[in-house]
Image (cartoon, rainbow, N blue to C red):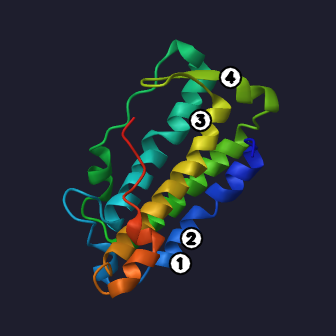
Amino acid sequence: MNHELQNTIALLERTPAALDALLRGLPAAWTENNEGGDTWNVHGVLAHLIHCEHDDWMPRLRMILEFGEGSTFKPLDREGSARSGAGKTLDQLLDEFAEQRARNLAELRALDLKPEDMNRRGMHPVFGSVTLSDFLATWPAHDLTHLHQISRIMAHQYREAVGPWVRFLGVMQCAGHSSQA
């Protein structure tokens, strides 16, 4: 599937509601535990999504439009997620994510990007030159990565409880797929 902005927006506008439907009101056992070690819990993933809404997606998009390859994206602050979630309840994070996503999508729509804009380039600190289309296609894929991560974190809480079925449950077999870039 090729990148189409309307398809990107269609998924991006649904992520907050999907997270809200899955997470709001759940017992803390589902959302406060992680997969062991230094892994994120659901709260941490939501804080990361909020941090990206503030410091990644629209600021980088504006950089591409304003500076092109003449200015390199600021690396994402990996500690920013902890600051974004500090002292907030899961419900507060869900509300903040929905509000910030709505603002970002309104700004994205207001840009009235044209097909020829999709070939504009920016400079990523690791990947080098990237197109606006590459960048925009990454946004919903990032959402899906973290929806997958959240389902994996939650499934991990019943890893022992499912007994022998663990071998048939793909979410229990997945060790994650993201790397830092």
Q: Earlier in the sequence, mark 2 or mark 3?
A: 2
70 relative to 5 in the view: left or right? left
Q: Which residue is mark 2?
A: 18
Q: Are marks 4 and 2 in contact (CB under 8 Å)?
A: no
Q: Is residue 92 visible?
A: no
Q: Earlier in the sequence, mark 1 or mark 4?
A: 1
Q: Are marks 2 and 1 in contact (CB under 8 Å)?
A: yes
Q: Position of residue 88 (x, y in %)?
A: 30, 66
Q: Is residue 81 above or below residue 121?
A: below
- The residue at the point 49 percent across, 77 percent down is 22
Q: Are marks 4 and 3 in contact (CB under 8 Å)?
A: no
- The numbered disc on residue 135 is 3
Q: Residues within 10 Å of mark 1 (few under 14, many from 20)?
A: few
Q: Which residue is mark 4?
A: 120
Q: Are marks 1 and 4 in contact (CB under 8 Å)?
A: no
Q: In the image, what residue type sits under mark 2? A: Ala
Q: Residues within 10 Å of mark 2 (few under 14, many from 20)?
A: few
Q: In the image, what residue type sits under mark 1? A: Ala
Q: Alpha-carbon distance for marks 2 and 1?
A: 5 Å
- The residue at the point 40 percent across, 48 percent down is 51
Depth check: give the residue in front, 105 or 42. Answer: 42
Q: Residue furthest right?
A: 115
